[in-house]
Structure formats: C-alpha cells, structure tokens
C-alpha cells in the first residue's frame, strides 16, 4: 500500500522542513519526503496550491465521556469529530463515570478506540482514586495499561502533599501531571469570571487568581520535585505571568495549554449576541480583555506550549437550563483549526510553523507521544490543511454527539482538507 502526497507545502518543524515537497507513505509509515518523488505505483493524492502537509494534529485535552456518559459523546463519535477537525490523536480526560483510575477502564477505552478505528486515543488517568483527592491511584499500573499522563481534571489535585507525591511518582514514570488549576475556596459556587459583567448580570464570580494561586503552588512543587507539571486550560493573565517567570528562571519542567475560546472570547459573550447563553459557560470561565490579550501574548512569545480544545460535550437537555444550573463546557474538536487559522495565523499573530508547533509538535513532546514529526520511518499521521478554505461553522452539522458551541454561525478562513492516520485517509473534506 503506497500513497504519494504531491505538491503540498510540507511544514515539519521537528525536522526543520518547510517547503514544497512530496511525501511518500508506505505500509502506514512515512517512507520519503523529498522535492519530487515518482509515483512508482503509489496512489497519488494531488494537493491544491497552498495546501499544507503537517504532522498529525494532537488535541491533548478532550472529554470522550465513555464509559458512563454516552448520551454526551462516545469514543466512536468523539474520534469521528477529532478526525473531521484534523486531529489524528487525542488524549482523553479521566472524569468519566466511573472515573478512569483503574487499568480496566483504560483498557476499555483502548478497546473502543480500536473498534472505532479513526483517531488514536491516549488515555489520561486520574491522579487520585475517584479523583477524590485522598489516595493516589495506581499510576504505575495505569501507565503500563496505556496512560500517558495523570490529572484529576474537572477538579484540581486537592492538596499540595498529593500533588507533591503525584509529581514524584509520575516523574519516575516519565509522564506529566496535568492540573486543573483552581483554588476551590476562591471558586466557591461561581459560574462566570468575577468582574463587571458577572456583577451586572447577577452571576457569582470566579476570580482569575483562583487559577493562578494553584498554578503558583504547582510550579513550586515542580521545582521541588523535578516532576513535569502541565497547566490545563489556562485562562488568567496572572497564570501566564507565573508560567513565563518559571520558564525564565529555568530548572523546572513546566508547560501549559490554552483553549481557543480563551484566546478569542471574553466575558462580553455573556451578554452578546445572546444573554445568559449556556454555551459560553465553561470552567475556567471566559475572562476579560486583559486576560484574553495575555493569552495571545503568551501564544506569540512562546510562553504557551500547546493549544488544546478542552472538548467538553454536554447534551442539549443539560445545557437548556438556567445559566447557574448548566454544566461547564463546550465542544471544540471541529472548530479549533478554523479558529486558529482565522484568529491567529491570518490575523498575523503567529506563522504557520508556530501553529504546527502548538497543535502537533508540542503536545507530542509534553506527553512523550510518537507523533509531531514527519521523519522517515514514523507512523504516517498527517493532517492536510487548506489555509484559505472558507468555513462556516454549523452546530447541527458537527460530528460530535453534542452541539454545545458558542461559534455556531461563524464564518472563518482556513480549514482541514484531509486527515490521515497510519497511512489511511480517515477524513476528506470535499468542500476544501
Ligand atoms: O468546562 C469544563 N468542562 N471544564 C472542566 O474542567 C470540565 C469539563 C467537563 O468535563 O465538562
């Protein structure tokens, strides 16, 4: 089985490649990358002018909801959404029902992944049993079963001592602790960013420092233990500052991710275009302009390592309630690439190689995954991007089982042309 990707612009930052090149895929792996390659019996995929051949995109923060919440999403529907969004691999969060704190659950997710046969799935295990913040889960057994990192996402790692031990153990296993940074006493029962808008709309607020206090705690513990700490879904300007300072000091392994909604939207969306739209309710919340701008600065200056979606599907019936009572979260897999193209690349904030770093090279590095590179001999996970394709986001057309997006109706420039996993075309966009 041979496929030749012909005429695209290969952007492969991990191997210092950027230019018009052909890519030959043979038996599921990258066989050759060179200026022009003969077809030589391969099936030829002629790429349009301007299309980009990138190492497969990786979303390291996705809620697939299986087991236990299959009315929101399943491994099959979530991976269908992933490949339609250009992601060849996703890492899935453990806040399923039951929580993924046991190899039996990791194995179940991997079995469902093999059945779906679309994107690769890398499970993230819970730090603590039931994510209750009391006893460490069996991190070693979970790593052996296939977990690539640990988190109690949905909640923070409850105590400094637990975080310390988790960093020590995970450090020995060579995997990161990903923390949902939030001080529960400051968050209280808040539902929106603490500020002018929440105050005028009668919503209980969550201040930015509820996040950054925990980021600071975890940085101190990463420095103490030498373990790798990754900040999940960063939203507050104070957190960006803390991560930037830690990176400048050096000597610790601190990385962070930002979701598209946190570098595009602000708490103004609580009022416009619709008041109290539960599709702008997520945790951490949409913050104010200074926070949004700090995310953009961090993306541009290298402080931010990864763009991850925090794809958090919820059923319409769950979201169609009062703002206070709705669950936190929005879907993100199928909107991320157009948003990044339109708001970061075409807006002149970052170049294409940086986009590929944020969406492929760096998530692979943070989780020590085999992806992020088009080196010869690597699995042929490839995303073909169409930077100028017009994209209209329609919630009803999403492959995800849930449609909870605040970007319904948005028109953007830049999308996905095709997604290739292990040499197999698993998604092709006829409109691109
Ligand atoms: O908005 C969110 N939704 N934030 C989280 O931390 C959890 C997630 C979910 O599981 O729905």
Image (cartoon, helix red, strand yellow):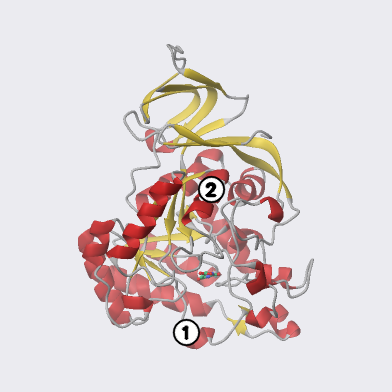
Crowd class of label 1 (few under 14; some 14 to 19; many from 20; radius 10 Å): some
Looking at the image, which is closer to me, 428 or 56?
428
Name the side, left or right, on which 7 lies relative to 367. Answer: right
Q: Are marks 2 and 1 in contact (CB under 8 Å)?
A: no
| Residue 145, x across and y down, in percent | 26, 58
Crowd class of label 2 (few under 14; some 14 to 19; many from 20; radius 10 Å): many
Distance from Cα at disc 2 to Cα at disc 1: 35 Å
Regarding residue 149, the answer to whether it shows in the image is no
Tell me the quarter of the picture where residue 167 sits: bottom left
Tell me the quarter of the picture where residue 230 sits: bottom left
Please name the residue shown 49% across and 47% down the image.
359
Name the side, left or right, on which 239 lies relative to 170. Answer: right
Please name the residue shown 59% across and 30% down the image.
51
Q: Residue 184 — which label?
A: 1
Name the side, left or right, on which 380 lies relative to 274. Answer: left
Name the side, left or right, on which 76 lies relative to 394. Answer: left
Q: Residue 369 — which label?
A: none
Q: Is residue 393 above or below residue 351?
A: below
| Residue 127, x across and y down, in percent | 32, 71
| Residue 285, x across and y down, in percent | 60, 72
Work out which quarter of the rendered image holds the N terminus and state it. top left
**Upstream in the sequence, badge 2 or badge 1?**
2
SS label for mark 1: helix
Q: From the image, tell me which residue sits under label 2.
A: 80
């Amino acid at each position: 089985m041979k496929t030749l990707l012909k005429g695209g612009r290969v952007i492969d930052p991990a191997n210092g490649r950027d230019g018009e090149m052909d890519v030959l895929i043979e038996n599921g792996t990258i066989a050759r990358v060179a200026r022009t390659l003969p077809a030589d019996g391969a099936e030829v995929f002629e790429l349009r002018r301007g299309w980009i051949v990138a190492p497969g995109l990786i979303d390291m923060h996705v809620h697939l909801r299986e087991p236990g919440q299959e009315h929101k999403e399943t491994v099959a529907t979530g991976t269908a959404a992933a490949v339609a969004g250009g992601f060849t691999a996703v890492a899935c969060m453990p806040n399923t029902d039951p929580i993924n704190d046991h190899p039996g659950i990791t194995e179940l997710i991997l079995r469902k992944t093999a059945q779906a046969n679309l994107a690769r799935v890398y499970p993230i295990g819970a730090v603590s049993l039931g994510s209750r913040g009391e006893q460490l889960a069996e991190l070693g057994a979970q790593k052996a079963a296939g977990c690539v990192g640990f988190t109690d996402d949905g909640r923070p790692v409850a105590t400094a001592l637990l975080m310390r031990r988790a960093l020590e153990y995970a450090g020995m296993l060579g995997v990161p602790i990903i923390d949902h940074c939030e001080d529960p006493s400051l968050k209280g029962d808040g539902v929106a960013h603490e500020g002018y808008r929440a105050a005028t709309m009668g919503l209980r607020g969550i201040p930015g420092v509820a996040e950054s206090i925990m980021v600071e705690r975890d940085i101190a513990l990463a420095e103490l233990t030498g373990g790798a700490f990754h900040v999940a879904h960063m939203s507050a300007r104070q957190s960006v500052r803390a991560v930037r300072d830690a990176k400048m000091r050096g000597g610790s392994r601190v990385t962070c991710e930002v979701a598209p909604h946190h570098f595009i939207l602000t708490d103004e969306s609580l009022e416009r275009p619709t008041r109290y739209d539960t599709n702008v309710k997520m945790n951490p919340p949409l913050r104010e302009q200074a926070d949004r701008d700090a995310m953009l600065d961090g993306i541009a200056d290298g402080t931010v390592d990864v763009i991850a979606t925090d794809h958090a599907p919820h059923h319409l019936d769950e979201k169609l309630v009062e703002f206070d009572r709705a669950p936190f979260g929005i879907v993100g897999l199928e909107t991320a690439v157009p948003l990044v193209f339109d708001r970061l690349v075409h807006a002149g904030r970052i170049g294409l190689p940086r986009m590929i770093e944020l969406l492929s090279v760096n998530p692979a590095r943070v989780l020590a995954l085999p992806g992020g590179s088009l080196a010869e001999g690597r699995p042929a996970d490839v995303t073909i991007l169409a930077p100028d394709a017009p994209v209209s986001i329609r919630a009803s057309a999403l492959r995800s089982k849930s449609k909870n997006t605040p970007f319904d109706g948005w028109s953007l420039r830049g999308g996905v042309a095709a997604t290739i996993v292990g040499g197999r075309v698993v998604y092709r966009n006829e409109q691109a």
